Image (cartoon, rainbow, N blue to C red):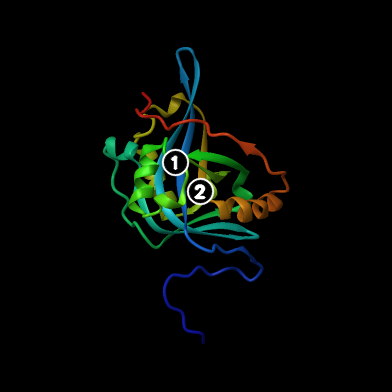
Amino acid sequence: MAKIVGLFKELSEDEQLLYEPKDSVLAMLVKELEVKKLMGVERKEYSLVYAIVYPYLTNRRLLLLALHQSESKFLVDHKAPKIPLRSGVWLEVPVKAVSLAELRSVDVKKDHDLSRFVDWAGLKESFFDRAPAVEVVYDDRQAAGKMKDYVDMVLEMGIVVKDQRKVERSFDKLLLIGEDVASDLLPLLKELLERPVEVREEVGEEGEEALA
């Protein structure tokens, strides 16, 4: 029997590894909400978790191994609980749960919260003002892992939006930031989804206040 040390993820017999990272990358877990207002609908993104991860892609799943996680300043300011396990946890997203994968740009310096995390991780020199990112929109109900569990807990506490009845639509997003994932991982994921690559500009900064 082969000896195994450290963290590992077992693949099923018919599961094939398509992408293995050369190095760790930055990741963001984002919740986008469309909320009813007196005059129309407001659409806003909330960055919830920043992480340093190793992303893997198989023919069945997108897997993230988090080396370190940090709550966003938005969550800290709104007294959200701290992430219980900060390292060595997985996020699993079935390919069938992915509705969209596209290329977008992230303004690292404009997002002060992300910029502070980049400084802490010692990756400041690796990023310019704007960086390419793979944006994955997925059905959170089909995802699994401790990272998902934490986000679910925060949402259930009403920290992001207090009245769920006002939410028209919500989108769960994963951003993987870096040149390698943009050039190597994205085409493979798009091939699995059988959709052409699209370029999308950044929606904007995250909301600073929780929605009433």
Q: Would residue 209 appear left or right of 92 to someone viewing this image? A: left
Amino acid at pointer 1: Val
| Quadrant in the rendering for residue 139 | top right
21 and 94: which is toward the camera = 21
Task: Give the vertical position of 33 relative to 56 (above or below).
Answer: above
Q: Residues within 10 Å of mark 1 (few under 14, many from 20)?
A: many
Badge 1 element: loop
Badge 2 element: strand
Tell me where residue 109 appears, x and y as whole percent: 41, 39
Tell me where residue 14 appears, x and y as whole percent: 66, 68
From the viewer's perspective, is the residue at label 2 or at label 1 nearer? 1
Residue under circle 1?
Answer: 108
> In which quadrant of the rendered image does the C terminus lie?
top left
Q: Would residue 83 appear left or right of 191 to someone viewing this image? A: left
| Quadrant in the rendering for residue 201 | top right
Residue under circle 2?
Answer: 177
Tell me where residue 145 appears, x and y as whole percent: 45, 56
